[in-house]
Image (cartoon, rainbow, N blue to C red):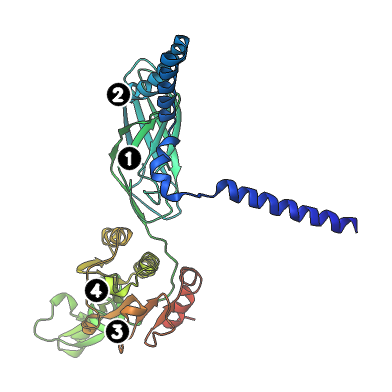
């Protein structure tokens, strides 16, 4: 009985504090915010206090002017000291590497040079490293003290949470020491840039598509060419090089006999990423675009790892990913900065050039065309080759769906 009374009192106390918190934190006059939000800055509070002390000194007692002098001194120090300190500061931002991935930390270096004899306190690097530049503008690094007439280097591990190019805004360094009345800022010079590739998942298996390309180390066992292991012999034909003559068989047959070797071949895939305005529904553009980019980056990376030749189509841009690392880097850099395009790349018109895969949404599905990976709600997309309805499905289910589509056990 006593325990029930205690629990009832606890519930009532909890409800009371919730209601009190709601009453104290509620904005009852949101329309008036634009007129009174400037009062949040302590500088204006000091200005009003100074004006009030002047009025009291004139109307009531001249001794109040002593308070006025104190307020003016505090305001002057709080405003002038940050401004003077920033006039003698030079700063530079640099990166140890040029490319990284979402979620992988990279070392960022900040070099600060103080030309004044007095030290500077409370420096902060703002802007340039936030996910949302409009809301998270303060994401960066804070420095306690920079001695006078010195150059100091600081470094920190920056873990990007979103693909793109960093700094994604003008990097600035600021200080509000000592009172925070005024924050003086100075632009930081940036050496190079950091390209953050999108998040990817590992895919095993390649589509059953073959196209001849000049690659001596990748040869087909079924096609005749100029490289690889010997497949057999045949009589000499006009135009055959003499280096292919099989001299022992020629001596035995008393006719010129040449050898046949394997032909160079590798898997070739054209990957079309649909980022057009018409294919992404309003309200979900950011989500579906990120899913399309993640799927495309996973395909591009996995096929490149398995020595496939990939043609990445983004709008009217074409990136060829071959054996060279430079082509792969260009394609991943393009996916890192990809956004909504004005139109969709060609799809379904180049079947003779190899295997085509289109990454699109339900709105962009082309009926009757195979090999379409549909992101978002795919229950209405009957022609979808692979359907992925959320980011979790891309991370968890896409590898298995791709493996089954490629007939890999």
Q: Which mark is residue 171?
A: 1
Q: What residue sits right under mark 4 in the picture? A: 344
- In primary-sequence order, the first of circles 2 and 3 is 2
Relative vertical location of residue 303 with respect to residue 401 in this rendering, above or below: above
Contact (Cβ within 8 Å) of mark 1 with mark 3? no
Q: Residue 75's quadrant in the figure?
A: top left
Q: Which mark is residue 366?
A: 3
Contact (Cβ within 8 Å) of mark 4 with mark 1? no
Image side of residue 183 versus residue 274, left or right: right
Nearest the eye: 282 or 348: 282
Q: What residue sits right under mark 2 in the picture? A: 87
Disc 2 from disc 3: Cα separation:
60 Å
Does residue 406 appear in this view? no
Alpha-carbon neighbours of circle 3 within 10 Å: few (<14), some, or many (≥20)? some
Furthest residue toward front: 59
Image side of residue 178 versus residue 84, left or right: right
Alpha-carbon neighbours of circle 2 within 10 Å: few (<14), some, or many (≥20)? some
Disc 4 from disc 2: Cα separation:
50 Å
Tell me where residue 147 appears, x and y as whole percent: 41, 20
């Amino acid at each position: 009985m006593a325990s029930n009374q205690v629990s009832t009192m606890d519930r009532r106390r909890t409800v009371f504090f919730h209601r009190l918190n709601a009453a104290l934190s509620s904005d009852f006059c949101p329309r008036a915010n634009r007129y009174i939000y400037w009062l949040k800055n302590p500088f204006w509070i000091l200005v009003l206090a100074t004006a009030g002390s002047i009025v009291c000194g004139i109307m009531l007692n001249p001794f109040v002017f002593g308070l006025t002098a104190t307020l003016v001194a505090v305001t002057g120090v709080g405003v002038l000291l940050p401004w003077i300190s920033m006039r003698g500061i030079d700063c530079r931002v640099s990166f140890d590497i040029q490319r990284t991935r979402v979620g992988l930390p990279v070392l960022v270096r900040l070099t600060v040079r103080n030309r004044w004899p007095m030290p500077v306190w409370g420096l902060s690097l703002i802007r340039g490293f936030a996910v949302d530049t409009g809301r998270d503008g303060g994401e960066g690094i804070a420095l306690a003290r920079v001695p006078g007439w010195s150059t100091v280097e600081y470094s920190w591990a920056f873990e990007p949470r979103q693909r793109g190019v960093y700094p994604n805004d003008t990097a600035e360094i600021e200080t509000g020491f000592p009172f925070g009345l005024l924050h003086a800022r100075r632009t930081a010079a940036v050496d190079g840039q950091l390209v953050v590739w999108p998040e990817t998942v590992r895919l095993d298996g390649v589509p059953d598509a073959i196209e001849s390309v000049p690659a001596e180390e990748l040869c087909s066992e079924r096609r005749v060419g100029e490289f690889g292991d010997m497949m057999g012999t045949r009589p000499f034909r006009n135009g055959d090089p003499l280096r292919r003559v099989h001299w022992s068989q020629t001596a035995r047959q008393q006719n010129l006999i040449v050898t046949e070797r394997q032909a160079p071949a590798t898997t070739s895939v054209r990957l079309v990423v649909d980022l057009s305005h018409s294919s992404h529904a309003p309200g979900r553009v950011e989500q579906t675009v990120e899913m399309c980019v993640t799927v495309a980056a996973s395909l591009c990376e996995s096929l490149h790892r398995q020595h496939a030749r990939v043609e990445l189509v983004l709008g009217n841009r074409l990136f060829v990913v071959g054996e060279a690392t430079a082509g792969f880097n260009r394609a991943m850099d393009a996916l890192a900065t990809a956004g909504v395009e004005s139109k969709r790349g060609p799809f379904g018109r180049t079947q003779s050039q190899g295997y085509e895969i289109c990454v699109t949404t339900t709105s962009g599905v082309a009926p009757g065309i195979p090999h379409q990976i549909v992101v978002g709600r795919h229950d209405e997309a009957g022609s979808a080759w692979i359907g992925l309805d959320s980011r979790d499905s891309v991370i968890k289910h896409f590898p298995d769906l791709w493996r089954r589509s490629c007939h890999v056990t």
